[in-house]
Image (cartoon, rainbow, N blue to C red):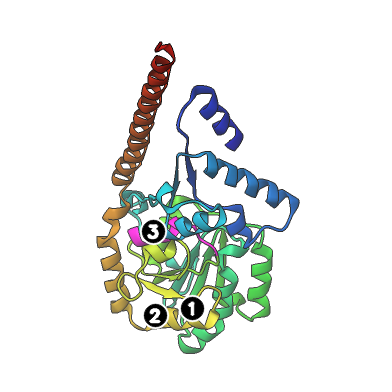
Amino acid sequence: MSQAAQTLKHLYDLPLIATIHATEHGRNHGIYTDLQHQIHHQEWELTYEAWRVIVCSTYMRHEVESVFQLPSDKVDVLPNGVDPQLLKPRRTAQVDKTVYALEEEQIVLFVGRLVQEKGVHTLLEAAPKILSEQTNVKFVIVGTGPVEAELRDLAHRSGLGHKVHFTGFISDEERNHLFNIADLAVFPSLYEPFGIVALEAIAAGTPVVVSDIGGLADVVEHGRNGLKVYAGDASSLATQVTSLLRNPEWAKALSHTAMEQLKKYDWNRIAFDTLAVYQRVLSEKHVLTGLAETAASSNGSDTLQP
């Protein structure tokens, strides 16, 4: 894709705009293998050739500026968005909570790919402390991925088998119902360029606890529309989760504030802002082309003077 974009740029003399939502360096916390070096170089080359670079969060702005040595005035931050209507369960029947937890249990929900950078192992490490203070809690883990077996083994070895429910893959409809019955949703990521699933939880009216990292740091303001924890810190996570489980009215108030702030993540607004970037680039390109043509004409006229 990078090479195709650069070829089209030079073949048709078109300005190139690159959108970067994650980097090889960020995903791996560094560059170590030959393949990673190859991907990293292609990403660097793409951003070098680009007229402007669009990223999805303040965190990603800092990352691309640092990793690719980009000037800050070359980068635009345009977040991902969410449609709250898509997070409302369509069926009129109520979901059967007992499929996931006992009626009296509070549900702590995770939704996402089961990969190392999502930090689910941190949630499982925090679970014993949470349960020591709030016994009627069930951890529902939604998703599949390469570390699923490892996470299931960790839950078993920690004696959490009856307190952790792995759902595997579920439909969007079932996910929406889970958001509605969950007491809170937890996203303890170690690396998260944006974190759209946290935005989806907010749109569904679910209180959230997130790592103070990446795009999640843009979405959540601690103590105002959710709670933040130190990434990879099980003790920090346990403390914040427990505080919300003990104070459901506070959790509801945080969720209400978060939903009121969703207008900044409206897809129509984001599309308008994206269009504005493209229009600005085309305008700048037009101006520079005109200046170049004027300069060429002037130089040509000079050579014809006796």
Q: Position of residue 61 (x, y in %)?
A: 45, 56
Q: Which mark is residue 199?
A: 3
Q: Which mark is residue 72?
A: none
Apparent side of residue 247 relative to residue 99 in the rendered image (left or right)? left
- Quadrant of the rendered structure where residue 45 is? top right
Structural crowding at the residue carrying mark 3, measured as other residues with C-alpha within 10 Å and reported as few (<14), some (14–19) or many (≥20)? many
Q: Which mark is residue 237?
A: 1
Structural crowding at the residue carrying mark 1, measured as other residues with C-alpha within 10 Å and reported as few (<14), some (14–19) or many (≥20)? many
The earlier-in-sequence mark between 1 and 3 is 3
Say which residue label 2 marks: 245
Q: Position of residue 286 (x, y in %)?
A: 35, 28
Residue at (36% x, 53% y) in the render: 87
Disc 1 from disc 3: Cα separation: 19 Å
Q: Which residues are magenta?
A: 191-203
The earlier-in-sequence mark between 2 and 3 is 3
Disc 2 from disc 1: Cα separation: 12 Å
Residue at (56% x, 84% y) in the render: 128
Q: Is residue 266 above or below residue 221?
A: above
- Residue 42 shows up from this direction: yes
The earlier-in-sequence mark between 2 and 1 is 1
Residue in the foreground of this view, choosing between 73 and 141:
73
Membership of 195 in magenta stretch: yes
The answer to the question of whether label 1 and label 3 lie on touching residues, with beta carbons closer than 8 A, is no
Work out which quarter of the rendered image holds the N terminus and state it.
Answer: top right
Apparent side of residue 171 relative to residue 293 in the rendered image (left or right)? right
Residue at (24% x, 61% y) in the render: 260
